[in-house]
Image (spheres, helix red, strand yellow):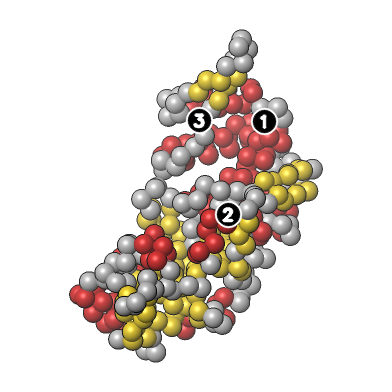
Amino acid sequence: MSLYKFISIEVGKKILSNLAIRFTQPSAFNDPFDCHPKLDLKISGDIFTSNQEIMNFLKEYLLSSINSKIPIIKYLSREKKGNMITSQILNKETLETYINNFFSNINNKNEVESMVLKDFISQKFGVLSLSTCWNNHLMWSHYADFQYGIAIEFDDNAEYFKQQSDFQFSKINKVKYTKNRPKFEFQIKNIDSFIAHQNTGNIFLYKSEDWFYEQEYRMIRILNDKYKTELKDDKGFDIYLYPITNSIIKSVLFGLRTPQNEIDEIMKLAKKTYPKIKFYKVLPKSKSYNFKKIKI
């Protein structure tokens, strides 16, 4: 079985030349439900040891959200009269008021600790998404720059996809597509016990049936600042690039609209690092809406 990464020309050149690939935070995904199942959290320990630690976390978390332009939930307060819901715009000037209001309205410390864990999932884990189908129209359109990009073929039998790292789900795993959002129960003491919990990896492996066409496989990493670059994506998220070996790449597929000059450049670039790499051009079949690939 082969696995494919659909990407733009620019990203493809970086992967092939730098021998590195991005593991992406779930908060940067295009599906708001992705990695957000229903969590039943029972926290018996202390993620925070004091109210001041909670305040410090909120300030740091919200400031980073503002600075990176990450969408965050506006503070909602329930007025005493009329049960009315109001909201306020959050910026650096209103941050202190926001935190004080938020802190005074939480029911207990576990509520904030649950927030910490959900933020940890969204910001501190990285996901490498690959697909088993090279010939899907939507994959080429959504992820490969409307057929101007490329797809890189990976060998799923390579040792790279079988290695165990700092997380139990670091090996390649198949995504499950379900009608309803799954529910996972956690009885934990702290973040370390959350990472080690048998259900934690499953959080990243369930998606809506609407995404079934992607036929996705995933690798998960706990993001390490060692692999953090100075780059940010167009949404303001930090980019983490993890090293790969040249033995895992089998071929490059060029889209219907990939310019010839880009094809020539990528072929020249890739042959230097990947002596056994193959190249294919994706073309439309004459009697159907399907694709075929022709070896170049």
Residue at the outermost left position: 261
**278 displayed left or right of 182:** left
Q: What residue is at 71 percent from the left and 33 percent from the top?
A: 109
Residue 208 has which mark? 2
Residue 173: x and y in percent read 61, 69
Q: What residue is at 73 percent from the left and 44 percent from the top?
A: 41
Helix, strand, or loop for circle 2?
A: strand
**183 displayed left or right of 125:** right
Residue 200: x and y in percent read 68, 56
Residue 167: x and y in percent read 64, 64
Residue 293 occupies quadrant: bottom left
- Residue 244, visible in the rendered structure: no
Residue 210: x and y in percent read 53, 55
Above or below 106: residue 192: below
Q: Which one is nearer the viewer's eye here, 72 or 104?
A: 72
First reached walking from the N terminus: tag 2 or tag 1? 1
Q: Amino acid at mark 2?
A: Ser
Name the front one of labels 3 and 2. 2
Residue 74 has which mark? 3
